Image (spheres, helix red, strand yellow):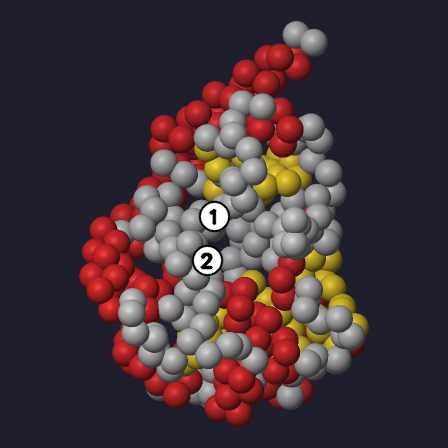
């Protein structure tokens, strides 16, 4: 095989008999019908190259998020934009949380990485220690994720604003990942600060909110035109397909779909948390569409035997064997997971 086989992420259901995938945190309802219709309608234009500048989509995103069109850069998914930022910025000292999404610092081969290790006994909450570590380590780049992946907790709004202010004062780039914010029942976006904080880069994606993981579409918001130009130069021409651009345009009008999703997530997340806790596991509070919990070290393999895939989080900095992340899915799917967990618990009990 010529491909990189070291993929630490969830969602790889292609190598075995997985019937239920709880390892990827996408919208439990899948893709909105309006987005599917837009994709189908785009098929007749696939003989032409896509718009290399995503003009219509950029204007629509700018209007949707209340920023200027020149402050928007679209990419083929959030991961591409993270790598694009890393290659354009070339950080010397980068600060990130632990645990957090692994892709922020993976492309930083020659950088020194400083990590703020979040405490399990504190529910992995981000505290004012973040400000203190920025002051003491003076990184040139800070990566934050709110809600954080894999913990699901949002960063306090005032702490986020203070962090953005401190980074502006010190000339530090702050990349804030808000990809899960639309599927969260708490937290505050910093989009309103984009114009006044040229050091701030906000990352967003259609992947999670609109069930578009297979389409690959994300964007960043930033008022530093020079940085966006350098980022744009790091990717291949026509990197965002016609299908992705059409899907994104349709998704921006799906506010009712997101409202329905949030109501479902709040209800089902509570049921999942309570059901897992009844088995004796530690489940951490979450504001997002996924839960982090601590269970048996062999739980992943036990569930795979029953056709259910969860995200083993032992490869996250700050976590160890026995930590798992699960998406909040449809009610009957969540019940199937709980049923499988109860069966495994009974099997363990009976030896």
Camera-nearest residue between 280 and 306: 306
Crowding near the residue tagged with mark 1, few <14, some 14–19, many ≥20 C-alpha atoms within 10 Å: many
Could you tell me if the residues under marks 1 and 2 are in contact, i.e. CB atoms within 8 Å? Answer: yes
The percent position of residue 150, horizontal first and vertical second, equals 58, 50
Indicate the quadrant where residue 103 lies: bottom right
Q: Is residue 275 left or right of residue 70?
A: right
Secondary element at tag 1:
loop
What is the x, y in percent for residue 212? Answer: 38, 55
- Give 226 or 349, whichever is nearer the viewer: 226
Q: Residue at x 68, y 69 (%)?
A: 107
Which element type, helix, strand or loop, lies under badge 2? loop
Which residue is rendered at x = 56% and y = 38% of the image? 15
> Label 2: how many residues lie within 10 Å, few (<14), some (14-19) or many (20+)?
many
Residue at the farthest top position: 350
Q: Can residue 58 be seen in the rendering of this structure?
A: no
Q: Is residue 29 above or below residue 240?
A: above
Q: Position of residue 348 (x, y in %)?
A: 66, 15
Q: Is residue 333 above or below residue 240?
A: above
Q: Which mark is residue 200?
A: none
Residue at which label 2 appears = 180
Residue nearest the viewer, comparing 63 with 147: 63
Q: Residue at x 70, y 79 (%)?
A: 91
Q: Please state, as top left, top right, bottom left or bottom right, where the C terminus lies in the image.
A: top right
Q: Residue at x 54, y 19 (%)?
A: 342
Dot 1 or dot 2, earlier in sequence = 1
**Which labelled disc corresponds to residue 25?**
1
């Amino acid at each position: 095989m010529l491909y990189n086989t070291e993929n630490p992420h969830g969602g790889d259901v292609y190598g075995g008999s997985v019937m239920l995938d709880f390892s990827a945190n996408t919208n439990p309802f899948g893709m909105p019908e309006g987005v599917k219709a837009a994709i189908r309608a785009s098929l007749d234009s696939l003989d032409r190259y896509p718009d290399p500048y995503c003009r219509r989509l950029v204007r629509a995103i700018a209007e949707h998020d209340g920023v200027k069109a020149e402050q928007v850069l679209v990419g083929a998914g959030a991961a591409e934009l993270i790598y694009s930022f890393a290659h354009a910025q070339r950080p010397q000292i980068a600060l990130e949380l632990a645990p957090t999404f692994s892709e922020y610092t993976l492309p930083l081969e020659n950088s020194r990485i400083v990590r703020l290790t979040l405490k399990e006994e504190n529910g992995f909450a981000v505290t004012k220690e973040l400000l203190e570590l920025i002051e003491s380590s003076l990184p040139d780049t800070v990566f934050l994720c709110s809600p954080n992946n894999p913990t699901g907790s949002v960063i306090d709004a005032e702490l986020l604003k203070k962090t953005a202010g401190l980074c502006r004062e010190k000339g530090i780039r702050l990349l804030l990942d808000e990809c899960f914010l639309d599927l969260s029942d708490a937290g505050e976006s910093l989009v309103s600060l984009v114009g006044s904080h040229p050091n701030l880069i906000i990352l967003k994606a259609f992947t999670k909110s609109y069930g578009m993981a297979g389409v690959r579409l994300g964007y960043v918001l930033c008022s530093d035109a020079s940085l966006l130009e350098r980022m744009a130069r790091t990717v291949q021409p026509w990197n965002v397909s016609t299908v992705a651009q059409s899907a994104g345009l349709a998704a921006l009008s799906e506010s009712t779909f997101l409202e329905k999703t949030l109501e479902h997530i709040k209800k089902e997340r509570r049921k999942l948390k309570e059901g897992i806790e009844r088995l004796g596991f530690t489940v951490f509070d979450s504001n997002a569409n996924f839960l982090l919990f601590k269970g048996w070290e062999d739980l992943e393999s036990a569930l795979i035997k029953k056709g259910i895939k969860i995200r083993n989080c032992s490869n996250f900095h700050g976590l160890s064997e026995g930590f798992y992340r699960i998406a909040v899915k449809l009610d009957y799917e969540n019940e199937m997971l709980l049923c499988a967990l109860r069966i495994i618990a009974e099997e363990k009990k009976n030896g």
